[in-house]
Amino acid sequence: MCGLVGVFDRTGERQFDRQLLIRMNDTLTHRGPDGWGVHVEPGVALGHRRLAIIDLTEAGHQPMSNETGDIQVVFNGEIYNFMEVRAELEKMGYQFRSHCDTEVIVYGWDAWGPACVERFRGMFAIAVWDRRVKTLFLARDRLGIKPLYYAHLADGRLAFASELKAIFALPDLPRAIDPQAVEDYFAYGYIPEPKTILKSVRKLPPGHILVQRRGADAAEPKAFWDIAFRTDPKLTPEAVREELVLRLKEAVKLRLIADVPLGAFLSGGVDSSAVVALMAGLSTGSVNTYSIGFDQPDYDERDFAQEVARRYHTTHTTRVVNPDDFELVDRLADLYDEPFADSSAMPTYRVCELAREHVTVALSGDGGDELFAGYRRHRWHMYEQRLRDRLPLMLRRPIFGALGRLYPKLDWAPKFLRAKSTFEALSFDAAEGYFHSVSILPTRLRSCLLRSSFRKSLGGYEALSVLRNVMDNAPVDNELSRIQYADIKTYLAGDILTKVDRASMAHSLEVRVPILDHKFMEWAAQIPPAQHIEGRQGKLSFKRALEPLLSERTLYREKMGFAVPLENWFRGALKDKIRKVAQSELLSDTGILDMSFLTRLVDEHQSGRSNHSAALWAVLMFESSLKRAKIS
């Protein structure tokens, strides 16, 4: 696990400032504290920070080259099947000098060119410079587990890095905000690929490559992988039960390869518990497991984690976090570089901090809800969709639209009385309905919060288009798979994996995600969707397969999530802080937010009349990000 940076001149061979490259590289020291290296030649400059995981010797140093030095590689991630690919390359006559996976990329590029990534099984962000063909090659893994940012600059330079902060180090980087990214952020709570908060910088989308040749126009990303949800009728419930654990065990086994201490997160939820159970069966010694607890029962899962730890005799370490653990608020903007409103980044940071005190690599259970339809919103969407299928939109929109407008927003009431959101969702088509479910700020609230002059600058753009484009082009054969695919392409990459990468890398911890093994995912995507949801239970195909390994209590309890008590914070510990944000000159000067409406939200929340915690947290993170990154 490492960090990479680079600059490439696509128009000529100008000499780059070595000291500037080193400054860019040093912004990523947290990603790789074990060493660093740079390569500078006319027209190209590469930098790397190393976190040593496999082959701890100097042989694993990057940038890494072939024997002639014509190919230079910097790489962040792990190629889990590198021994298999290495054997194939050795049969072709290539001779290896190290035992690390980076060298497989060097010779894989030489042998297969851009198609080399199709052979790699793992998580990766890769940059290859090939002097022979004057070509820079960038690649990002299939799911976007590892990040890669790039910027085509006006003078013909192409800059790239593992994190935005490294590109921010370029003194002439244009820092104008992308208005569409702001609209996206206040809708989703993160900025979906390929946008960033800046017009000048983009994320390389998951499963994409970028091939930039010298003398050519600025290259655009091209996809090398996608996941298709195509139902296989041969995957009966019995067949799924037999195969699922075997396939997941193989994915876990691949991720146990390391020359450093290794452990796992154990929240007590189904996914992390499954990973720990399989690790225990594959390990000769006790598995190291880590979890975070809270003093408030509504947020605490320690009891469930402890049950799994006892069953599998893990060396379990728990740390209780004060529910008012808000000292990280200002730190988050430094970690994420651009606005990021998932408050569970805070406990994620703490569990990574705890794990790193003992191990260098940790396995996590991320991806299970997306792949097996485990979110509550999946069930609700399918309930709503059944009604949508029975009544045409021309009838639903006026009837349920009116009910949604008239029905009061009862934040204080029991859940069965909070029908406003359901009425609104039923007045929409499928894409609008799912967008309504995943939005952190409803469209009506967002339109009030964003200043009218700013909304005009959007030219009619709406954040809904991100989700609609994905859903309209999804390679699926049913509605449930459509929203699972949408989650994988948006929420998983933009929120979940971003959160885990930055929180873990802040502590120089490598996190591996076996459920997101692309071969396992390709198989699971063929499971008939009827096996995933039944009544109030989601993720059933996964849970039933795990019944021999986990208790019914672990498998079938209500999902809790990894939440923090924002509602209380903004009426207590963060009361004054959010007041100051509502009066921020920096925020006002951007012309983006209606500051009087923001003050109204603060008043309503702190009086207890409404719960605006999601909106207030998004604004707080937005202001902090602008302040840290000095963007406008």
Image: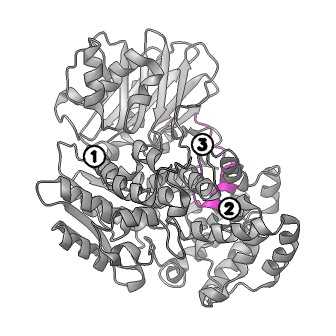
Among numbered discs 2 and 1, the one appearing first in the sequence: 1
Identity, as a three-letter code, of the amino acid under mark 1: Arg
Please check the rendered image and state whether residue 204 is part of the magenta-colored stretch, yes or no: no
Q: Residue at x 60, y 90 (%)?
A: 414
Identity, as a three-letter code, of the amino acid under mark 3: Pro
Work out whether 473 lies above or below 382: above
Residue 293: % across, % down: 32, 76
Q: Which residue is disc 3 drawn over?
A: 194
What range of the chain is rendered magenta?
170-193
Q: Nearer the viewer, residue 143 or 4?
A: 143
Within-10-Å neighbours for mark 3: few <14, some 14–19, many 20+ = some
Residue 203: % across, % down: 55, 40
Q: Which residue is disc 1 drawn over?
A: 255
Q: Which residue is disc 2 drawn over?
A: 435
Q: Nearer the viewer, residue 4 or 592?
A: 4
Work out whether 213 lies above or below 18: above
